[in-house]
Image (tube, rainbow, N blue to C red):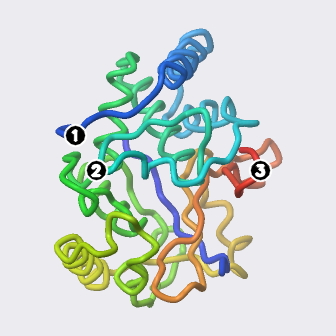
């Protein structure tokens, strides 16, 4: 039950050991998704189709920024009433995994989020969160959760130095004025830069569209210096074979 990942060029300028932060509304939304899955027998479908079906139930949900920064320390935050591009695909993936595994309690969802979001599923401060999507991809491949198929379907080498967080520490409240965390992030960037990643150039998307499947997770690269990924979403294959992009667009918009 491994989900596919594809990096596309598009110019855009587990063990839980921390406190969990969520509301009764988040629990209710989660239960509603599992009831939907049961009533539509989603567990019998391939995981990509489950991701799409669950993702569609979030359509109309407001975009919400910075939801993972709640609290003074790094905690497991679940916020389903408002989503950004990351928490949208993350929540859809985690719910789909629960459904496919037949584990559909809120605690099961909570465990899946922790396993997906944090390095080796262990919460140990801000640097244990997989903040860079390339780092997220590498660690979740090791955990057997996803598989990067970008090179397989025609992607080319993605050559870029990643150092946005260490060169912009003031943008991150748990990074600024914290030398220990800064050094941890710098080491993570060095590790990212030692690995190879591949992407599909924007002008070649139509050429490789047939290799993109329903429910594939799409990472869009960015022209912002030092940053690896600028946006994320889910591929939705229509009846005519064309691929559409389901995502949480931006502040003031909806999924």
Q: Is residue 31 visible?
A: yes
Residue at image position (57%, 45%) is 88
- Going from the N terminus, do you reach mark 1 or mark 2 first? 1
Q: Work out how far the residue at label 3 is from the one at label 2, CA to CA, in angstroms.
A: 29 Å
The answer to whether residue 141 is above or below residue 190 is above
The secondary structure type at the circle numbered 1 is loop
Q: Is residue 44 visible?
A: no
Q: Nearer the viewer, residue 28 or 53?
A: 28
Q: Quadrant of residue 9?
A: bottom right
The answer to whether residue 245 is above or below residue 174 is above
**Decide: marks 1, 2 in contact (CB < 8 A)?**
yes
Position of 33 with respect to 228 (left or right) is right
Q: Nearer the viewer, residue 242 or 170?
A: 170
Return the x and y of residue 56 as percentages of the image width and height. 69, 34
Return the x and y of residue 221 as percentages of the image width and height. 56, 75
Quadrant placement of the C terminus: top right
The residue singled out by tag 1 in the image is 18
The residue singled out by tag 2 in the image is 73
């Amino acid at each position: 039950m491994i989900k596919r990942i594809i990096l596309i060029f598009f110019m855009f300028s587990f063990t839980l050991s921390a406190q969990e932060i969520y509301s009764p509304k988040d629990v209710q939304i989660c239960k509603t998704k599992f009831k939907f899955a049961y009533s539509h027998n989603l567990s019998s479908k391939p995981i990509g189709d489950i991701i799409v079906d669950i993702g569609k139930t979030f359509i109309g949900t407001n975009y919400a920024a910075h939801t993972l920064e709640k609290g003074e320390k790094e905690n497991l935050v679940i916020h389903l009433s408002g989503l950004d591009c990351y928490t949208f695909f993350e929540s859809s993936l985690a719910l789909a995994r629960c459904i496919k595994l037949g584990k559909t309690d809120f605690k099961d969802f909570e465990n899946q989020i922790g396993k997906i979001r944090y390095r080796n599923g262990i919460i140990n401060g801000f640097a244990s969160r997989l903040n860079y999507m390339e780092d997220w991809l590498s660690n979740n491949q090791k955990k057997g959760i996803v598989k990067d198929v970008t090179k397989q379907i025609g992607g080319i080498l993605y050559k870029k130095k990643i150092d946005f967080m260490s060169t912009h520490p003031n943008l991150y409240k748990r990074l600024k004025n914290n030398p220990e965390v800064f050094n941890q992030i710098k080491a993570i960037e060095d590790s990212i830069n030692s690995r190879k990643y591949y992407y599909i150039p924007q002008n070649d998307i139509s050429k490789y569209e047939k290799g993109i499947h329903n429910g594939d997770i799409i990472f869009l690269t960015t022209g912002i210096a030092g940053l690896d990924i600028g946006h994320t979403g889910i591929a939705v294959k229509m009846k005519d074979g064309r691929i559409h992009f389901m995502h949480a667009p931006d502040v003031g918009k909806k999924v």
